[in-house]
Each structure stands twice: as structure tokens, then as C-alpha cells.
Amino acid sequence: MLAVPPLVRTASKSQKKNHNPSFSTFVALVVSVVSFLPSSLFAEESASQSASGYRSLFNGKDMAGWSGAVENYEVVDGALQCKKGKGGVLYTDETFEDFKLQVEFQLPPAGNNGLAIRYPGKVAGGGDGAYVGMCELQVLDTEHPKYANIDPRQAHGSAYGMVAAKRGFLKPVGEWNYQTVQVKGSKIQVELNGTLILDADLSTVTEYMNDKPHPGKDRTSGHIGLAGHSDPVRFRRIDVMPLPK
């Protein structure tokens, strides 16, 4: 019998040593699965983690946890909608001091509503959320011809009558917009669809639209509300995260 040359024999043993079917199959499977995972899954996980600490103020079914103008709102397709021709402030049963708020809203043509911030509610006197609360953040189809001549402090995202927000970041009418609001002390920030459009310290405001003062602007706590103005504006996500003092 012919002897096998040592070099060939050594190579053959090395090949057998490294050839592990179960290990290679496992590695190939992992690589295959990871490469085919949609990036959206990672995005969703990241979004979920970033939203940690938020809780919903609206259950998508009814107005449990809300007071005020409940008869002027309705739930349509899982969203809170102001009834056409109706208005008033629908506000949370709870009160908040410093917080972050995430909302999704949909505007009809020329739609007008608002976010009442630190609203006093019925017990403390109620009234126009733009004046008796810390402020009303406008929710408005700003670019509609109907509002061509408004004061800049009336544009979407503005602290109504006090500080103007940047314009041009609303999505087309009928699409859903995403907005984050942060209220900390006298400071308020509004981010619309990923762009910071308002960064204001209301304690420094001394000039008001039409020279009408806002007695509630220095409030340190209150309800979160939706300030209806007769238009069927919809809100389908309303999440809050209280902030430490």
C-alpha cells in the first residue's frame, strides 16, 4: 500500500477539524435572519424605548378621564373629534405641573382647535383657555386663505396671542401630524413633525396681541385640554409624561 504524503494527510485532518456542519448551519441561519429583518422593526423598538414613561390620556373608545365640554366632542374612528359647530374646552380630570405631551392631530380645511396648557378647569373658574390657563397652543390650518391676515401669534403652534411659532411645517390637510410639547416651569417648547417651532419663556412676555393680557400665563399647574372652535379637528394619540420639578 502506498503511504499518503504527510502534507496531504495534515491538510485532510485540518479540513475535517474545521468542518462542523451544525456550527456553520447556525451561523448561516443567524446571518440570514438578521439580513432579512425589516429596518422598521428596529425603528419601532427604538420608538417604543424613547417613549418610555409616557402614558395615554385617551383610550380610543370614549371620553373616560375627561371633563368639560364632553357633549361637544365625539369618538370617530378611534380619534377624539370636536363636533362641527361646537366648541369649548374638553380637559383631563387630572392636573399636571411640568410634563411632556405627545399628540397626533388631523386638520380639516381651515380647521381650528388648540391645546389648553395648565387650564384651571371648571372648579377654578373655567373660561377661555387662551387666557385663564398658562396658554393655548394653536392647532390651526394656518396656510388656509381664511387666515391670510392673522397675527403671527395666532399661527399653528403659537402660544396664542403671546409668542409666534415658526410656520411651514404642517403636513397637507387631511394627513396626520405629530407634535411634542414640553412644559417646564415658565418655559414651553413645541416640536412639529420633527422640527422645533416654538421655544419660549412666557414669564418674559410683556406684549400681547390686541393689548389683551393673559392672567393665567404664570400658572404652575392645571389640566391639559382641547380647545374646540367649531371645526371637526381630530386627535388620536394623546400621551403624557410628567417631569420632575
Image (cartoon, rainbow, N blue to C red):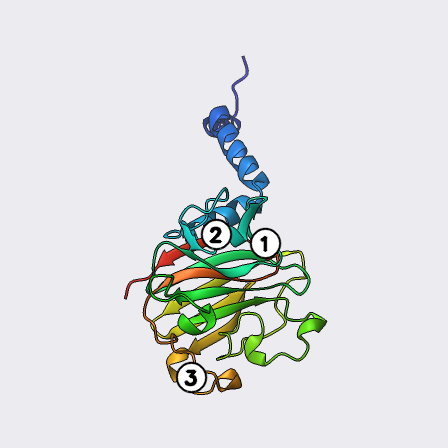
The type of residue carrying mark 2 is Val
**In the figure, 195 relative to 47: above or below?**
below
Q: Residue at x 41, y 53 (%)?
A: 67
Residue 189, how many percent across, how many down?
Answer: 45, 70
Residue highlighted by disc 1: 83
Question: 113 or 49, which lies in front?
Answer: 113
The type of residue carrying mark 3 is Val
Label 1 close to label 3 by CB (< 8 Å): no
Q: Secondary structure at mark 2?
A: helix
Residue 7 seen in the figure = no
**In the figure, 242 relative to 209: above or below?**
above
Residue highlighted by disc 3: 205
Picture quarter containing residue 200? bottom left
Q: CA distance from mark 1 to mark 2?
A: 10 Å
On the picture, is 245 further left or further right than 72?
A: left
Residue 199, how many percent across, how many down?
Answer: 46, 75
The type of residue carrying mark 1 is Lys
> How many numbered discs?
3
Q: Residue at x 61, y 68 (%)?
A: 169
Q: Quadrant of the N terminus?
A: top right
Mark closest to the chain's N terminus, 1 or 3:
1
Crowding near the residue tagged with mark 1, few <14, some 14–19, many ≥20 C-alpha atoms within 10 Å: some
**In the figure, 149 relative to 194: above or below?**
below
Q: Secondary structure at mark 1?
A: loop
**In the figure, 219 relative to 209: above or below?**
above
Question: 43 or 1, which lies in front?
Answer: 43
Mark closest to the chain's N terminus, 1 or 2:
2
Residue 105 seen in the figure = yes
Residue highlighted by disc 2: 70
Mark closest to the chain's N terminus, 2 or 3:
2
Picture quarter containing residue 167? bottom right
Q: Secondary structure at mark 3?
A: loop
